[in-house]
Amino acid sequence: MEIIKMENTNIALVLIDIQKGLDEWDYYGGNRNNLDAEKNAGLILSEFRKRDLPIFHVRHGSTNEKSPLLATKVGFEIKNEVKPAENEPIYTKNVNSAFVGTGLENELKQLNISNIVIVGLTTNHCISTSVRMGANIGFNVTLIADATAAFAMIGINGQKFDAEIMHQTAMASLKDEFATILDTQAFLENL
C-alpha cells in the first residue's frame, strides 16, 4: 500500500470514539497505551482543517446501561482535543464499525472519497473493525498508530494482556492487508 498524499482531493479524516467515557480506565481494563493518542489525533485534525479537507466524527452510543458511553452520560461527549467544528458531521453508532448504522459510507461515496485516514479509540475494537470494513467496502485506509490506543484485556485462560501488546497485535493484523500504518510524524511529513 502506498502513502496517501494530502494533495489528493478525495481524502477524508475519520475520528472514531474519542470520547470522555474512555477516560474511565478501570471500566475498560485499567491499563492503556499511547497516552498522547488524543493529542496526536488533534494534530492531524488541525492539518485537515487548515487544508479544508473533509472531516467526519463518529461516536459510540452504547446500549449497555453501565457503559460510560451511554448517550445520557457525560462520557458520551467527544473529547475537547478533537471537538467537532460546526460544519463537521457527527455520526453515532452502537456497534463496533463506523460504517454500520450510520450514513458515513454513503456520504464518503457521495463526495467521491476513496482514501480515508482513521484515528481514535480503541485499536482492537472499533478501530480494527472500522479499518477492516472500510478496506472491504473499497476505501484505501491509512491508520495512524500513535493516534489510536488500546486497553489491557483478559484472555480466554485468564491471562492479562498488556495494552501495548493488544495495540501492537491489532496493528500487525491490519498492516498491509487492510491499511497503511503510519505514526503522526510520518503522516504529517508526507503531506
Image (cartoon, helix red, strand yellow):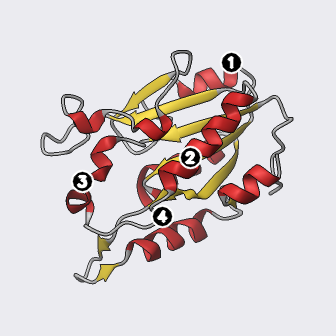
Neighbour tally class for label 3: few under 14, some 14-19, many 20 plus, Cα within 10 Å: some
Q: Which residue is mark 1?
A: 110
Residue 56 left/right relative to 26? right
Find disc 4 in the rendering and name its residue: 34
Q: Secondary structure at mark 2?
A: helix
For the residues labelled 2 and 1, say whether their Cβ atoms are less than 8 Å apart: no
**Three-letter code for the amino acid on which mark 4 is drawn:** Asn
- Of mark 3 and mark 1, the one earlier in the sequence is 3
Q: The residue under label 1 is which amino acid type?
A: Gln
CB under 8 Å between callouts 4 and 2? no
User: Does dot 3 land on a helix, a strand or a loop?
Assistant: loop
Q: Earlier in the sequence, mark 4 or mark 2?
A: 4
In this figure, which residue is indicated by the disc labeled 2? 41
* Front of the two marks 4 and 1: 4
With 2 as the anchor, is 24 left or right in this view?
A: left
Q: Residue at x 74, y 53 (%)?
A: 187
Please name the residue shown 63% across and 46% down the image: 136
Q: What residue does disc 3 label? A: 24
Q: Which kind of residue does numbered mark 3 sit on?
A: Glu
Q: Position of residue 10 (x, y in %)?
A: 78, 30
* Residue at the image position 64 percent from the left and 43 percent from the top: 44
Q: Earlier in the sequence, mark 4 or mark 1?
A: 4
Badge 2 or badge 3: first in the primary sequence = 3
